[in-house]
Image (tube, helix red, strand yellow):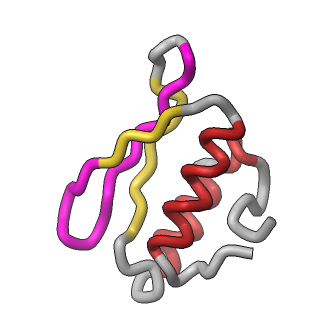
Amino acid sequence: MVERDDYAAIRDRIAALARAHGLRCDWAETTKRQRFLLLWDAQGRVAARAIVPLHPGETPHFVETLEQGLAFLFGDNWLED
């Protein structure tokens, strides 16, 4: 189970799942409070976009949105497994 209030744990979980699904992660700092994530497939197409909060403990609703937004790639409750 991933600590939902730990950015590094969420980032590492996304990276591990992306590798397992053959995806490449590109991260970009969009503000001091969040990072923009692009997940690319093997053909060079964007498979998903997401906003990842840098301080998830302060914004749990953003973590829930992130989890729901990537569920189509990683499965439901991918942060819990």
Quarter of the picture containing the N terminus is bottom right
Asked if 68 appears above or below 58 in the picture, the reply is above
Residue furthest left as drawn: 31
Q: What secondary structure characterizes most of the magenta part?
A: strand
Quadrant of the snapshot with the C terminus: bottom right
The magenta-colored residue range is 28-42
Q: Return the x and y of residue 12 as percentages of the image width and height.
A: 55, 61
The residue drawn where x is 40% and y is 56% is: 51
- Residue depicted at x 59% and y 79%: 4
Measured from the top left, where is residue 57 in percent x and y?
Answer: 46, 87
- Tell whether position 39 is magenta: yes
**In this view, 9 is above or below 20:** below
- Of all residues, the one furthest to the top in this rendering is 43
Q: Is residue 62 left or right of residue 73?
A: left
Give the vertical position of 52 relative to 16 (above or below): below
For the image shown, how many numbered marks are present on the structure? 0
Residue 26 drawn at (x, y percent):
37, 40
Q: Is residue 33 left or right of residue 55?
A: left
At horizontal 54% and vertical 67% (from top left) the residue drawn is 10
Q: Is residue 27 magenta?
A: no
